[in-house]
Image (cartoon, rainbow, N blue to C red):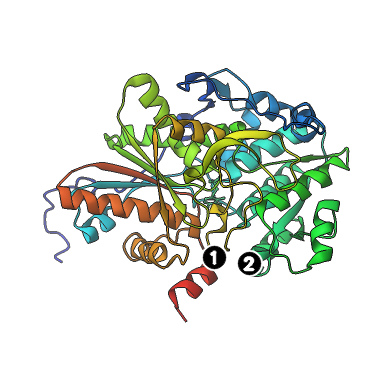
Amino acid sequence: MAKNKARTSSPRQESKKTMVNLKFDEMPAQWYNILPDLPEPLPPPRDPEGGPSRVQNLPNLMIGECLQQEFSTERWIDIPGGIMDLYVKAGRPRPLFRATNLEKRLDTPARLYYKSEFFSPTGSHKVNTALAQCWYAKQQGFARVTTETGAGQWGTALSYAAAVTGLKCTVFWVRSVYNWKKDRLSFMKLLGAEVYASPSPMTEVGKALYDKNPEHVGSLGIAISEGLEDSQKDPKATYCLGSVLNHVLMHQTIIGQETQKQFELFDDYPDIVISCLGGGSNFGGFALPFVGDVLKKGKKIKFIAAQSKVAPNLQGKYEYDFADYAEITPMLMMYTLGHKVDMEPIKADGLRYHGCSPIISLLRNKGYIDTVAYPGDEKYVFETAKLFMETEGWLPAPESAYSVCAAIEEAIKCKELGEKKTIAFNVSGHGFLDIHGYRSVLGLE
Ligand SMILES: *Cc1c(COP(=O)(O)O)cnc(C)c1O
């Protein structure tokens, strides 16, 4: 190219604007609590017939501030400055990308945008609530947090949040995943956490199952019971949950609120909002601010929750069920497959949970949310994730691959129908520590 040939336009004018981000000053300073805006009051947690009251025991299980938030009727809740600082340290705000290469490859008239929750120190959106919970736990004088983890993302997020807020962390990790995610295990240990394969001999619930079968594959429900029991035995410890509960979804609304502002900067607005759904935290965090637009501003949006056929909890029964295997938690009104159900292992283990968050369940029951479930062998889903990689270059977490897959299906529908829809999807995490999963499913040997 001739160096001094006169340009007719500036590089900025030539750019297609494929990314938008916010400045610190533009970062949302409040979480959005959808409870007062729901079409009907959310059915409260309930006790089963007989036995001790789980509801009355909640203050012993949960961080006080989080318990208050769980039932708050305030629409907006200030994010404390200390938590804002932690969010920034963890890479917030996170960009919204336009998937121009993927659009071209699919030859679709649809416009596709994806939120980059993979820009996370531990690899997922889960740090958004982990940081809030640890900050409040520290304020309340706790020295240790306990939890369960399935895919390992939540355990890593809580280990990280505990590290940066000066707390100890104990993680009970579903054995079927613990056994193969060696890198993630080391990651948690590097962050200073104590990690046990669950069922473990460390708790009574765990020991009963462990003694019968030391190779028991475990489940999220069992691991939750172990985390709860461990925290109950230590007055300096409190339990943290990474999904399902109202306050967890509320902490995650930072994702959707940022996305709303970023869409303004793109001068666009979504017709379809998509995310993967296990317990509902990333879907809720991404979608609920937009659901608020539908409920209050008359916007029309199609919401799609992408799931696995191994755990299609949104296609289960809408009824009261326990959140954990050992029935320590109160019963929640939710779509559930039953808290004792056995589920086949999949690589997207974060989607393998028997129940869906009560908030999302109510919205689903009222017809606001659609769902799709993909085959358990995961070939189809991971192939679409590969297409996303070959075009956009980012490696999604196995769970996020379900979101990518649903977005690609909608974009193809737009092509068939000649519709120029705007599709927003959340990429809840990266898969750098899950390449083994892709390798075994796609045969990349
Ligand atoms: C945990 C996890 C999920 C599923 O959990 P939700 O609470 O439904 O969001 C999805 N994606 C990633 C990357 C996760 O770590």
Circle number at residue 434: 1
Mark 1 residue crowding within 10 angstroms, few (<14) / some (14–19) / many (20+): many
Query: In the picture provided, is 43 more to the left or to the right than 262?
Result: right
Residue 52 screen position, x and y as percent: 82, 32
- Quadrant occupied by the N terminus: bottom left
Residue occupying the point 20% across, 53% down: 108
Circle number at residue 93: none
Asked which quadrant contains residue 383, the reply is bottom left
Residue 430 appears anywhere in the view: no
Q: How many marks?
A: 2
Say which amino acid is labelled 1: Asp
Give the residue at mark 2.
181
Residue 274 screen position, x and y as percent: 38, 44
SS class of the residue under badge 1? loop
Q: Is residue 184 above or below residue 6?
A: below
Asked if disc 2 and disc 1 are in contact, CB closer than 8 Å, the reply is yes
Q: CA distance from mark 2 to mark 1?
A: 7 Å
Mark 2 residue crowding within 10 angstroms, few (<14) / some (14–19) / many (20+): some
Query: In the picture provided, is 74 more to the left or to the right than 159?
Result: left
Residue 190 screen position, x and y as percent: 72, 60
Q: Is residue 329 above or below residue 176?
A: above
Q: Is mark 1 within 8 Å of ligand 1?
A: no
Residue 433 appears anywhere in the view: yes
Say which amino acid is labelled 2: Lys
Residue occupying the point 58% across, 39% down: 87
Query: In the picture provided, is 270 more to the left or to the right than 40?
Result: left
Residue 53 screen position, x and y as percent: 79, 29
Q: Is residue 2 above or below residue 172?
A: below
SS class of the residue under badge 2? loop
